[in-house]
């Protein structure tokens, strides 16, 4: 199918997935990996939940924002059918050995059994080429589960991921559910999906939801270290903000959405300007004549001409004024650093 296929949008926890910016989604609950049943585990609002069997579905329908068809049981058709019929958004994980056709066929089956609110999920050892192909061929949202390797967040967004599934902040277990601070105490005010901490990254993530993510009477072994987990979320937030701003087209419909998109672009622009200033400082140490006296007007004109080919509507005249200010700011910064050595 064509990559220009009309995009489907699935609303998860009140936030659209599949249009506009990529989003950060708080970790998922796997009842297959948890001790006890759904009644014990899902005491508060949950985000994405994978059932261990049909008996979990009434609890999931009541307390989850989305239900996961896990990679380990995609061939359990009776359970897949029951999951698809819950009326919740369905996240279909790809079985590691499944082909693109098999993955999309299962997603289509879930859509037919339910209300067409289907999200594709690539996890484990991510095949980013397959993720990109699935998004282009299906028109459905595709998310990447990067809990095992948050360092792949930027690559996943660059490949076209509409969202990144990450572990929740400090105190969460391997599937992203916060552990209680003491027996019977809910582990924080998390909801179905979590937003970024602040700033432009916050605008790129799904907003905070409305209740505790869940309680557990016992803490299972194997939780992530706080630093790894928080770092993984930061990596995801940076990816959806910076990489998304550069590579993900957006068509905001409201003033608020437009301002959020501008915030993301500004965050990427600030990051690039800081990097450019640092490189300009290095250049000053390598030139025979540094500082303002070492400026090369010919090179600067050529630079502006190359930029104008990427930004034809701005044109060379406007870009020349912008780049003159950027170059001067970098030179002033280099001089200040040299003076403080």
Image (spheres, grey):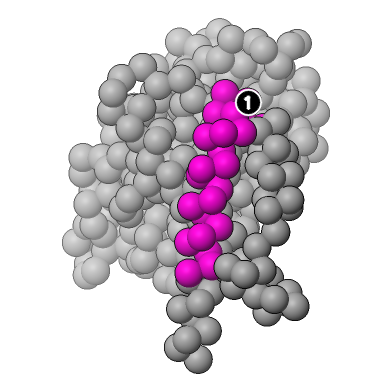
| Residue labelled with disc 1 | 312
Eyeballing the image, is 301 above or below 131? Answer: below
Q: Which residue is drawn at 46% across and 20% down?
A: 251
Eyeballing the image, is 116 above or below 283? Answer: above
Eyeballing the image, is 85 above or below 127? Answer: above
Q: Quadrant of residue 66?
A: top left
Q: Residue at x 52, y 84 (%)?
A: 338
For this view, does 60 lie left or right of residue 140? left
Total marks in image: 1
Q: Quadrant of residue 253?
A: top left
Q: Residue 241: percent from the left, percent from the top? A: 48, 45
Q: Residue 247: percent from the left, percent from the top? A: 61, 35
Instruction: Between residue 78 and residue 14, name the one nearer to us.
Output: 14
Instruction: Between residue 317 and residue 185, name the one nearer to us.
Output: 317
Q: Which residue is drawn at 65% across and 10% down?
A: 5
Q: Residue at x 73, y 52 (%)?
A: 299
Q: Please provide the residue range marked out in magenta.
A: 310-332
Instruction: Between residue 269 and residue 16, name the one nearer to us.
Output: 269
For this view, does 131 lie left or right of residue 45? right
331 within the magenta span: yes
View extreme (front): residue: 293
325 within the magenta span: yes
Magenta: main secondary structure: helix
Mark yes or no: residue 23 visible. yes
SS state under label 1: loop
């Amino acid at each position: 199918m064509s990559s220009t296929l009309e995009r489907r949008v699935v609303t998860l926890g009140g936030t659209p997935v599949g249009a506009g910016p990529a989003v950060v989604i708080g970790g998922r609950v796997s009842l297959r990996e948890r001790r006890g049943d759904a009644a014990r585990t899902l005491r508060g609002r949950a985000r994405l939940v994978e059932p261990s069997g049909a008996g979990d579905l009434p609890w999931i329908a009541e307390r989850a924002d989305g239900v996961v068809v896990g990679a380990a049981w995609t061939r359990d058709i009776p359970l897949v059918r029951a999951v698809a019929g819950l009326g919740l958004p369905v996240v279909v994980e790809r079985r590691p050995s499944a082909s693109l056709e098999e993955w999309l066929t299962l997603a289509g089956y879930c859509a037919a059994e339910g209300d067409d609110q289907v999200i594709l999920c690539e996890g484990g050892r991510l095949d980013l080429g397959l993720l990109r192909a699935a998004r282009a061929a299906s028109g459905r949202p595709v998310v990447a589960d990067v809990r095992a390797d948050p360092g792949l967040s930027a690559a996943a967004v660059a490949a076209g991921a509409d969202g990144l599934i990450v572990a929740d902040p400090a105190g969460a277990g391997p599937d992203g559910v916060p552990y209680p601070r003491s027996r019977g105490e809910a582990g924080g005010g998390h909801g179905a999906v979590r937003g970024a901490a602040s700033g432009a990254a916050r605008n790129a993530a799904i907003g905070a939801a409305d209740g505790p993510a869940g309680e557990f009477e016992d803490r299972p072994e194997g939780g992530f270290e706080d630093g790894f987990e928080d770092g993984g979320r930061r990596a995801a937030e940076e990816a959806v903000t910076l990489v998304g701003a550069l590579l993900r087209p957006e068509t905001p419909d409201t003033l608020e959405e437009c301002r959020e998109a501008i915030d993301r672009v500004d965050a990427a622009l600030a990051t690039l300007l800081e990097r450019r200033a640092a490189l300009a400082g290095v250049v000053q140490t390598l030139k025979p004549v540094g500082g303002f006296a070492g400026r090369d007007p010919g090179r600067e004109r050529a630079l502006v001409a190359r930029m104008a080919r990427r930004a034809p509507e701005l044109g060379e005249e406007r870009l020349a004024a912008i780049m003159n200010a950027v170059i001067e700011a970098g030179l002033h910064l280099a001089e200040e650093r040299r003076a403080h050595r």
